[in-house]
Image (cartoon, grey):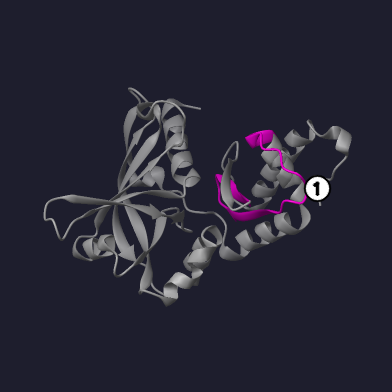
Amino acid sequence: MAANEQIFFEARALLTGQRHGVLSTHSVVMNGYPFGSITPYTLGRHGEPVILISAIAQHTKNILANSKVALTVVQPSDREVQAHGRLTCLAEARQIASEDRDTAERYFHYFPKSRDYLQTHDFAFYRLHLTRAYYIGGFGKIFWLEADELRRANPFSAVEEKRIRDHMNEDHQSAMRHYFESFKNILKPEPHKIEMIGIDGEGFDLALEGKIHRFQFAQAVGNMMEARQALVAMARQTALVHEEKNEPGLAA
C-alpha cells in the first residue's frame, strides 16, 4: 500500500471506527469563541457523518447561526495521548429532510435508544458535508485531506444492507463469535447474542452486550458478492483456529 493510500486508510478507519466525537461550533452566546460538545454520530449512505441534535441544544442554536463546524474523533489508546491518532473534519452542517427514513433507520441501528428522541424536544438529523480534514497519526505524521479523499459512499442500498445483516444475524452467529475471538481476542460463551448492525464498503459493525465493535475488511468491497467473499475469507481465517469444532462457515 502506497504512503498516501495508507494515510487515507488510517483516516477512514478512524472515522468509521468511532461512534462519537467533539462537535465544535461557533458560539452565539460568547461571540468569537468556539463551543465544543460530545456528540454521537454514524456515517450515512453518502459516507459522511450524521448527527441527531435537539433544537434546544446550544450547539444546534450555534449551527443555525453559522453552519460551519468541526468534528474531532480520537483513537482510543492506553498510550500517551499525543501518540493517539486523531482526525478533525471541517464541514457544513445541514439539516436532513424528515422524509429521509433510510438515514434515520441506519442511525437507530447504532443508537436504538434514540428512536424516541424525535418525539421530544424537536430533534432533527443533520449531515456534516465534509469540506476538508486534518489527520494526525502520531508524532510527525500530519496531513491535510480533501473531502473527496475522505468521503466514501456506502456501496450497499438500504435493502442490500438489511439482507446482509439479516443473513448474518439469523444464520451465522457461530462465525461472528469466531470473529470476536480471532480478530478482537474477546472470548464469549455461546448464549451471548451478537448482532450485525451495519456494513459498508470498508468493514462492518457488530454489537455484543451493548457495545459496538468495528471490523475492517482487508480491502474495500463494492457489491454484495465482494462482501460475501470478504466475510467468507474472514470466516475461513477464524476456522484455522477452530477446525476441531467443525462448525459451519458462510458457504450457505
Q: Name the residue under label 1.
A: 251
**Residue at the image point whose x is 55% and y is 48% from the top:** 201
In the rendered image, residue 73 lying in the magenta stretch gets the answer no
Q: Position of residue 12 (x, y in %)?
A: 45, 41
Q: Give the range drawn in magenta.
A: 182-208
Which kind of residue does numbered mark 1 sit on?
Answer: Ala
**Residue at the image point whose x is 53% and y is 67% from the top:** 105
In the rendered image, residue 196 lying in the magenta stretch gets the answer yes
Q: Residue furthest top?
A: 140
SS class of the residue under badge 1? loop
The answer to whether residue 223 is left or right of residue 98 is right
Label 1 packing within 10 angstroms: few (<14), some (14-19), many (20+): few
The answer to whether residue 51 is left or right of residue 231 is left
Q: In the rendered view, tell whether residue 180 sits above or below residue 39.
A: above
Q: Which residue lies furthest to the left in this view?
A: 31
Q: In the rendered view, tell whether residue 27 sits above or below residue 159.
A: above
Relative to the observer, which residue lies in front, 14 or 202? 14
Q: Position of residue 46 (x, y in %)?
A: 45, 57
Q: Position of residue 177 (x, y in %)?
A: 72, 44
